[in-house]
Amino acid sequence: MTEKHIYCPNPYILAEIMPYGYVYPCSCGWIKGYYFGNIFEQSFDEIWNGEKAKEFRQKLYDNDFSLCPGCQNLEILSETQDKEAQLISKPPERILLGLDETCDVKCIFCRGENYKIDTNLIPKDKEDKLLEILTPWLENAKYVKTNAVGEVFASKISRALIKNIADNFPNIKFELITNGIQCTKENIEKLNLVNKISMITVSLHAMKETTYNKIVKGGNFKKVIENIEYISKLKKEGKIERFELHFTVTSINYKEMKDIIKYARKIDAKIRFLGLDCSKDCEKIYKQINIQDRNHPKFNNLVKVVQDKQIKNSSDIVIQGLEYFTELKPLSIKEKLKNIFRK
Ligand SMILES: C[S@@+](CC[C@H](N)C(=O)[O-])C[C@H]1O[C@@H](n2cnc3c(N)ncnc32)[C@H](O)[C@@H]1O
Ligand code: SF4
Ligand code: SF4
């Protein structure tokens, strides 16, 4: 019997370049923070094809998922016919940038009232050299997704970087993740992003303004809706390929899940419901609003909502963080391995 090996594309195609310059081959929570290197301290080759990258690729080839304990993307795993592990990779096709955490609001599950933005995520002497440092990473890139840790339109550094990338790498398409407040026609034009956006994700955690205000402190519901209408027009005209709304599920907003599904369909967007994570300075509120916890008094109400046939069987609805919802658990890595090896 030939030995089977599993292949995951991420450590060959994806680089997540995150606060302080650390490079991860996948969502850092899923891989417990295992990084390949640091863009402010090492060269591209030292990171992308260095010892830590090779070790990661070798382990996956050996069906050793010990570095991926939180994987939530089992559907991208497949069997490989390669006789040995491919340890060296060409530059990544997808870059996720999350270098600056500046934001114009404080969402209750992301930043507590006393949250202070860390201005040292990018060394001061490197701020003007970001494009130069990132150039080898961008050479083969088809997509740049940003900003994973802050608000792209609210940050001077992020805005300058995006415009520089758009001006210097005309073939790169952008995937924007935004709270929607400053995602206006004018700002899209200013950043040279017209006809360069492949996806926009707008975080909209409520359909009622009163609920939105309980979650997004300092936000502007009406402005977000106005900007969503503009993005929807671009989507309907075929000027952006994908449009998603993101809705982080809590005890405050779960009753509005069905309303946002209706709204998403009206504006030609997909909807992604995100499970709640415990971020370090929101522990207190997390306990109160974490409806995914079996012991939360409203837990059963949430299960009823997500078990609704309309939600379960719809291709335009994604529920991410499924392990939190009873009876909707995804396969574990072990089961996925067993299924592939059984064939
Ligand atoms: C960190 S934000 C960055 C992009 C942009 N500022 C935004 O809000 O869309 C990316 C996504 O993470 C989600 N998020 C933030 N903190 C979270 C938490 N503790 N649990 C689950 N999702 C969270 C937000 O709701 C948002 O959809
Ligand atoms: S196996 Fe899962 S966690 Fe590991 S790199 Fe692939 S997608 Fe990421
Ligand atoms: S808008 Fe995004 S980055 Fe800003 S506080 Fe909310 S979730 Fe965090």
Image (tube, rainbow, N blue to C red):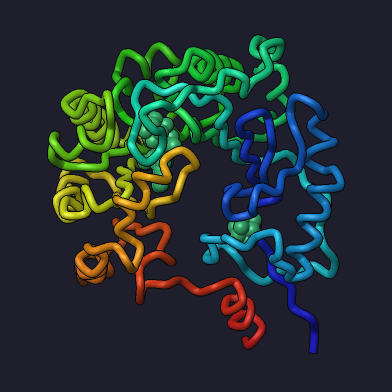
Q: Is residue 323 left or right of residue 233?
A: right
Q: Is residue 142 visible?
A: yes
The residue drawn where x is 57% and y is 32% is 97
Question: Quarter-wise, where is residue 63 in the image?
Answer: bottom right
Question: Compared to 113, does 286 lie above or below?
Answer: below
The residue drawn where x is 69% and y is 38% is 23
> Where residue 161 sits in the image (x, y, percent)?
56, 17
Question: Quarter-wise, where is residue 64 in the image?
Answer: bottom right
Question: Compared to 10, does 146 lie above or below?
Answer: above
Q: Nearer the viewer, residue 250 or 52?
A: 250
Quadrant into which the C terminus falls: bottom right
The residue drawn where x is 59% and y is 71% is 333
Quadrant into which the N terminus falls: bottom right
Q: Nearer the viewer, residue 174 or 21?
A: 21
Question: Compared to 117, does 174 lie above or below?
Answer: below
Q: Is residue 93 left or right of residue 180?
A: right
Q: Nearer the viewer, residue 28 or 75?
A: 28
